Amino acid sequence: MVKKKRIISKLILALVVLTAISCCFLGSTFARYTSGGSGSATVTIAEWNIAFTTDGSTPLTDGADIIADSTQLSPSMDAWATSNTRSHSTAKAKIVITNSGDVSATVTVDTADTVTVTKAEDANYGAAAISSENYTLKPAPTEAQVQGLFSVSVTYNSDDPDGSEAASATDDATAGGITLAPGGTLNLFVCITWTSADDLDEGKGTDGKVADYLDTWVGENITKVASTVTYTAVQASELPNA
């Protein structure tokens, strides 16, 4: 009996050893090659850098006076003539727009529909517009009639601040804006013009007296005129190119 137990024990031990050896062979047979690693997906951001300045270096802040607040404007000193519309303008104030970024920009320009006029404290507007029928009574014009004497224009050129100017920037903005490539410079020129109301005299035989009276009233009663000019740059290209 003891001998039989020894034989069984040896068989069990042999079976355990064979099982262990079998597992080793099976593990080697079904093992897989594996390898790995890591990398970094990196891209440099295209810079957006648009500068609005007055001379290429002095920043022009939002809401700043484009035309110096101390600038004075008078009407034309020319005498009235049937074939001539009298007007006089301020010197052109320059806005320099520089694209120092990596993508193009579309510049658009917009001006206010009307000019804001500031009257003297003791001045008042009239209820009716000045005309050839009432001007001899020396009435005050309406605010709208005074505003109608003034207009704001914005013209431009590229790169050359002293070069010839292109068409109205506001007209080109309506057509889709002005494209400014990376590294490019755009110069906007802003001025306010006083145009005498000579058209009021057509067929009335006053020889410009109505317009002269209206200009004189403005010179005596209006202290300032202003208009808002809005200029905007919007991304116009992308990187990488399609």
Image (cartoon, rainbow, N blue to C red):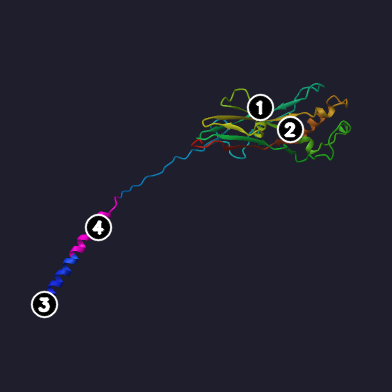
Image position of 26 (left or right of 120): left
- Decide which of tag 2 and tag 3 comes sooner along the chain: 3
- State the quadrant of the N terminus: bottom left
Residue at (82%, 28%) from the top-left corner?
A: 199
Query: Badge 3 local density, few (<14 within 10 Å), some, or many (20+)?
Result: few
Query: Badge 1 local density, few (<14 within 10 Å), some, or many (20+)?
Result: few
Q: Which mark is residue 2?
A: 3
Amino acid, disc 4? Leu
Tell us which disc is closer to us: 2 or 3.
Answer: 3
Image position of 6 (left or right of 163): left
- Decide which of tag 3 and tag 1 comes sooner along the chain: 3
Residue identifier under label 4 = 26
Residue at (24%, 55%) from the top-left corner?
A: 28
Residue at (22%, 58%) from the top-left corner?
A: 24
Real-space Cα separation, disc 1 to disc 2, in angstroms = 20 Å
Amino acid, disc 2? Phe
Q: Nearer the viewer, residue 71 or 183?
A: 183
Residue 165 coordinates in the image, percent (x, y): 63, 25
Is residue 212 among the parts visible in the rendering? Answer: no
Question: What's the magenta region?
Answer: 17-33
Q: Is residue 99 magenta?
A: no
Residue identifier under label 1 = 167
